[in-house]
Image (cartoon, rainbow, N blue to C red):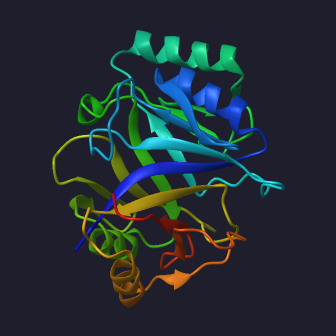
Amino acid sequence: MALRLVQVNFKARDDSALGRFWAEALGWDISSEGPGVSNVEPAGFTGPDPAAVCVDVVTVPDPETVRYRAHLDLATASEAHQAELVARLVKLGATPADIGQGDVPWTVLADPEGNVCCVLEPRPIYQDTGPIAAVVVNCADPRAMVRFWSGAMDWTVHEVTDDFARLRSAKGVGPYLEFVRTPAANAARGRVHLDLRPYPGDDQAAEVARLRDLGATDADVGQGDVPWVCLADTEGNEFCVLSPG
């Protein structure tokens, strides 16, 4: 049994507006599975497919104050591409963000609702990931987090230190999932979370029970009666287990 990371979920005041921003930012298409939900996916995408981790934007009545526990790193192919992408995102409504990064070769921006993203300088490791280089989660203990998430998913661990850990799909495609040691990472809830999906034929309840054995706990985010299960990892980061598919 195993799970797949299929999408990053943004809580929003306006899913349509924020969805359009991210569709333009990534060069992807936007659609909607229902009121209050915008789905951002590559053109012609048929998922789940590890080649892309998609973006779902969901309108909620009162989204929490912006926090930076999880964010997207965007890949670039050259310094010119990095400059062009930053300029394009600013034109779309992004603003410069100071999260204490200091003098770094990447550019930190906030989307129109304040969610941070990083436009990276060109790095060889991210040249085949697609527009999303990595989904980055701030944490207190990368080693503990990678133990949990490598047990939760069928992704391969690529690097682990006291300060940083990195996983990627066992297929060797798509973005990385990275954990970065950050002071006070557990201070607040975030507006961005991960959605996992079991493989066809697997049992959602059995997967949830397995995650609890790994240290996950039940999470109540006001979801009500829904077909997915809300959990929190060992550092309290919420995530959802969707129905198999």
Residue 154, percent from left and from top: 23, 64
Name which quarter of the figure residue 87 lies in.
top right
Q: Residue at x 79, y 44 (%)?
A: 13
Quadrant of image for the N terminus = bottom left
Q: Residue at x 54, y 62 (%)?
A: 182
**Nearer to us in this view, 186 or 26:** 26
- In the figure, 94 relative to 155: above or below? above
* Residue lying at the far right of the rendered structure: 62
**Nearer to us in this view, 227 or 152:** 227
Residue 188, percent from left and from top: 70, 67
Quadrant of image for the C terminus = bottom left
Name which quarter of the figure residue 189 lies in.
bottom right
Residue 70, percent from left and from top: 55, 54
* Residue lying at the far bottom of the rendered structure: 213
- In the figure, 79 relative to 99: above or below? above
Residue 230, percent from left and from top: 55, 72
Q: Is residue 219 left or right of residue 179?
A: right
